[in-house]
């Protein structure tokens, strides 16, 4: 057993050493001014949108299958250079978290060396998955290259390579944004993709049917095609509702009393209700997407194909009129709520309700698991926060300065809030997907609002830090 553990550690060290030879975006030697950070952020978003308009070379004229939540969660545009989007990056994080949870690999995430090792492993695994997922997208038949999707077809490998290159570009754009821009590149690409999709679905002008679009966006249909059909506005009301709920939840927090020293100044340590942010949903939906892809790839294999097909069915966002594999496609299927209001309780809607129930139960469970992993990995666990407070000279009023005392108090708040926050984002994302099928993804709206809110907080913090020296000088005068 000890030998096996040593072999695993040897493999980890080997992979970490290989990652050092990968191209890397160097950290800035000095603080990047706010204007430059904003400029780098805008440039990264523009490159992302440009990549989403460059079609893959070598595809046949066969219809490209799309599934809604993949485009939302993975910031992807099927059939373009960003077909896989940020999928390899997120999938690499999922695999490593699962390996850590199963104790297949042992890395101390509380230490700086452990976090560096984890990031190195994640990067090299993401690079490998760029090529693997690029191949899966084509070999599964989701994208059909000229000459078919047989592995002996050179065009299959050429298309797969293009998809891999697109994901690699996004990987390094994420590094640029993280080190020289504002926020996270992954989050930024998700928000940009969702915002663009939402705007187009609502305000899209009517285009000639030759291009496959004839009725325009929701507002155009409501005003001119079917005036007075208020069901058309249901998704827009759902978007507004999710937006208000997320903004309200972002402001909810629990204040834990702390003080500096025995008789020091009192204060409060806030623990936000959305302590886990929106990462559990991103990881959960990315995992579901992988079930969908592997179900397509193994469709002809008798036992494995059936098992993965069941997983794919259970992890699909249900919709009416398209209750098959990839049922969350936004063309051809209406939302579950709309279907019930129009059709009533029919066999089709009952089947969709059953699927929605299974989907919600699995989503909640997976989000709780990933929420716990994310808190541990993000240095936000009870032990990590207690250590940070102790190093800062903080303690709980009325108790002696002891890390164990701080941990005991934090245990009353952080684990329950982690679970409740994970359940909340899962419910909001799941119900949003059920309501908004046909315009956008509830998951996408949830993520976008949270991302924009945190980007606003970061911009406000940057401006406050910039003004602090000026205010101190004015106070000195």
Image (cartoon, grey):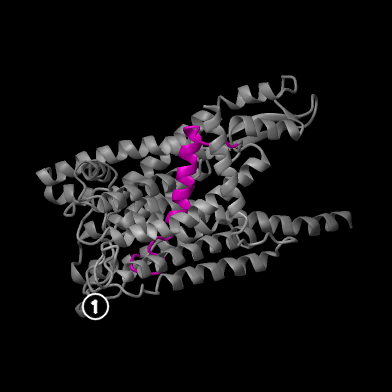
Is 291 placed above or below 46 here? above
Q: Position of residue 251 (x, y in %)?
A: 53, 43
Q: Is residue 245 left or right of residue 107?
A: left
Q: Residue beneath label 1, please?
A: 211
What's the residue at 25%, 38% (across, down)?
Answer: 357
Q: Position of residue 57 (x, y in %)?
A: 35, 75
**Under tag 1, what secondary structure?**
helix
Would you say residue 193 is visible in this rendering? yes
Is 436 placed above or below 138 here? above
Total numbered labels placed on residues in the image: 1
- Choose top left, top right, bottom left or bottom right for residue 253: top right
Magenta stretch, residue numbers: 78-107
Q: Nearer the viewer, residue 87 or 331?
A: 87
Q: Position of residue 348 (x, y in %)?
A: 13, 46
Q: Nearer the viewer, residue 152 or 147?
A: 152
- Choose top left, top right, bottom left or bottom right for residue 205: bottom left
What's the residue at 34%, 65% (across, down)?
Answer: 78
What's the residue at 61%, 66% (across, down)?
Answer: 38
Q: Position of residue 233 (x, y in %)?
A: 27, 59
- Choose top left, top right, bottom left or bottom right for residue 407: top right
Is 185 placed above or below 10 here? below
Which corner quadrant holds the C terminus?
A: bottom right
Q: Is residue 230 left or right of residue 413?
A: left
Instruction: Estimate how packed mark 1 is, as few (under 14), some (14 to 19) or many (20 or more) residues with alpha carbons within 10 Å.
Output: few
Q: Is residue 415 left or right of residue 137?
A: right
Magenta stretch: includes residue 163: no
């Amino acid at each position: 057993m000890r030998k096996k553990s040593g072999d695993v550690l040897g493999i980890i060290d080997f992979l970490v050493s290989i990652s050092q030879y990968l191209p890397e975006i160097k950290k800035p030697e000095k603080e990047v001014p706010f204007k430059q950070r904003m400029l780098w952020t805008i440039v990264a978003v523009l490159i992302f949108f440009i990549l989403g308009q460059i079609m893959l070379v070598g595809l046949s004229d066969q219809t490209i299958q799309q599934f809604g939540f993949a485009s939302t969660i993975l910031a992807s545009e099927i059939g373009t250079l960003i077909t896989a989007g940020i999928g390899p990056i997120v999938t690499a994080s999922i695999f490593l978290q699962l390996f850590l949870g199963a104790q297949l690999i042992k890395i101390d995430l509380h230490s700086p060396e452990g976090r560096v090792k984890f990031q190195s492993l994640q990067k090299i695994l993401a690079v490998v998955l760029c090529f693997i997922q690029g191949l899966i997208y084509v070999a599964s038949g989701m994208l059909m290259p000229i000459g078919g999707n047989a592995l002996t077809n050179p065009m299959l490998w050429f298309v797969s390579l293009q998809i891999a290159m697109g994901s690699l570009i996004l990987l390094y754009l994420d590094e640029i944004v993280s080190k020289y821009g504002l926020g996270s590149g992954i989050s930024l690409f998700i928000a940009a993709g969702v915002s663009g999709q939402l705007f187009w679905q609502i305000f899209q002008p009517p285009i000639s049917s030759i291009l496959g679009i004839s009725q325009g966006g929701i507002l155009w249909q409501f005003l001119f095609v079917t005036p007075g059909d208020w069901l058309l506005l249901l998704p827009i009301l759902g978007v507004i509702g999710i937006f208000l709920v997320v903004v309200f939840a972002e402001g909810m927090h629990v204040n834990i009393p702390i003080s500096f020293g025995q008789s020091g100044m009192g204060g409060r340590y806030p623990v936000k209700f959305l302590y886990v942010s929106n990462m559990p949903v991103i990881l959960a939906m990315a995992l579901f997407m992988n079930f969908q892809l592997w179900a397509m790839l193994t469709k002809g294999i008798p036992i494995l194909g059936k098992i993965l097909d069941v997983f794919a069915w259970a992890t699909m966002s249900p919709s009416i009129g398209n209750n098959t594999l990839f049922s969350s496609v936004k063309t051809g299927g209406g939302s579950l709520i709309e279907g019930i209001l129009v059709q009533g309780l029919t066999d089709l809607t009952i089947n969709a309700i059953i699927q929605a129930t299974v989907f919600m139960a699995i989503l909640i469970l997976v989000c709780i698991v990933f929420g716990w992993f994310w808190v541990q990995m993000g240095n936000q666990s009870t032990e990590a926060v207690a250590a940070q407070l102790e190093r800062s000279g903080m303690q709980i009023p009325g108790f002696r300065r002891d890390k164990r005392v701080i941990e005991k108090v934090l245990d009353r708040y952080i684990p329950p809030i982690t679970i409740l926050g994970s359940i909340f984002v899962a419910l909001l994302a799941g119900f949003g997907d059920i309501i908004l099928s046909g315009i956008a993804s509830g998951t996408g709206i949830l993520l976008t609002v949270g991302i924009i809110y945190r980007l606003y907080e970061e911009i406000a913090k940057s401006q406050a830090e910039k003004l602090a020296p000026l205010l101190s000088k004015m106070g000195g005068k």
